[in-house]
Image (spheres, helix red, strand yellow):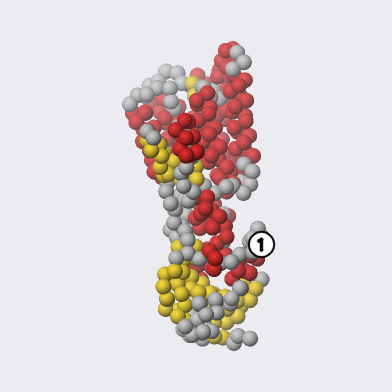
Amino acid sequence: MPLLRSRCPHCLTRTLTEVPFQDQHVFQCTTCQGLWFEDGELNDLISGFDPDIQEHCHVSHLGKRLGTGQRQCRHCDIAMEHHHLLADYEVEIDRCSGCDGVWIDHAEVDQVLHSPRIIEAMKSLNKGINWRSWLFQFLTQMPVEYNVASHRTPWVTYTMIVLCSLVFVLGLVSPGTEQWLLNTYAVQTDTVGTPSMLLQLLSYQFLHGGWLHLIGNMYFLWIIGDNIEDVLGHWRFLALYLLAGAVAALAELTWFHLLGGERLLLVGASGSIAALFGLYLTWFRYSSLTFMILVFQKKLAPHWYFLIWCGLNLFGMFSGQGGVAFMAHLAGFAFGLLLGRKLKALIERDNPLVRLLNAPEARLRR
């Protein structure tokens, strides 16, 4: 039976005492708060912490050996080996080669407990580009996303895609039906200040001006909406999506008025989805989106991808290109960035894997 107090591998003082931790008893230093795990205890702790993990072996997942450290094993009285926790996650832990005991600093505990989730996430994030992703983007000019799969079914995202598609098909029934939908539900300068405008600020988001407009918007909603809905929850995601669309429309109307335009007819979910871009950039910095120049495909971090997207929108707006609501795009994106920063602490508190993957210890291959 170990002594009640023994030597801390970090402090080298007899400040290691047995304490309850996650339904187990482990040794913790009363000074530095680091934790000592006997052989097998860490695996049991990780398996018990995550209900989806039946069995875990931390040794088989250890990353690069960094050499012999300064810390001394509390049993063997030898210098412990320094390792990265995982191959692609560079948190450093100490392991005794004699008794397989493990020392973890207090700041590393959360990362170690979530290590099985991190392992699976890094596999998804660090997948390489292949011929299928290249061919898809070459033919469609749409990016391929690399992110962690959502844990809950994104019902709101799917519903929005179905509703927008159904409304578009309904408009194909006859030219008269399409014109009625536009006159009734599109945002337009003729209804500014009237009660019907309140409905139009929401309904215009379900109308689209053509197949390419619809497919482009729905594709981006499909690839990024699931992750955002996953961390926000269904109802908050719906409310934010519709609110962002209304903000984008008001920004476009204001810009159109400042330019002295006569009549504006605004349709599409682009402003709402641009706000999702801002949220995605803020919360999922570890994800990747592919970008293609001619035949060269490259995984980009979200900030680079959306920087290019913003540049294209600014160029289109100031070069006088018509038929695209550039201000709605940029205003929606700015709204998403602001809201994303405001909610970031809440999102990372409720979704610890998001916080851990955004940490500098994650080694992302792009």
- Which of the pair 269/12 is nearer the observer? 12
Could you tell me the amino acid type at mark 1?
Answer: Gln
Q: Residue at x 64, y 39 (%)?
A: 155
The total of numbered circles placed on residues is 1
- Which of the pair 99/5 is nearer the observer? 99
Q: In this rendering, does residue 211 appear at all?
A: yes
- Which of the pair 55/306 is nearer the observer? 55
- Which of the pair 251/96 is nearer the observer? 96
Q: Residue at x 63, y 34 (%)?
A: 159
Image position of 62 with respect to 37: above or below = above
Image x and y of residue 128, in percent = 46, 47
Describe residue 293's horizontal placement relative to residue 176 as left or right: left
Image x and y of residue 119, in percent = 54, 58
Image x and y of residue 287, in percent = 48, 48
Q: Residue at x 47, y 35 (%)?
A: 135
Q: Residue at x 53, y 64 (%)?
A: 61
Determine whether the residue tagged by mark 1 lies in a helix, strand or loop.
loop
Quarter of the image for residue 258 reads: top left
Image x and y of residue 165, in percent = 60, 27
Image quarter (top left, top right, bottom left or bottom right) of the N terminus: bottom right
Instruction: State the residue position of label 1.
Output: 54
10 Å crowding of disc 1: few (<14), some (14-19), many (20+): few
Q: In this rendering, does residue 246 appear at all?
A: no
Image position of 38 with respect to 202: above or below = below
Residue pushed farthest front? 131
Image position of 313 with respect to 99: above or below = above
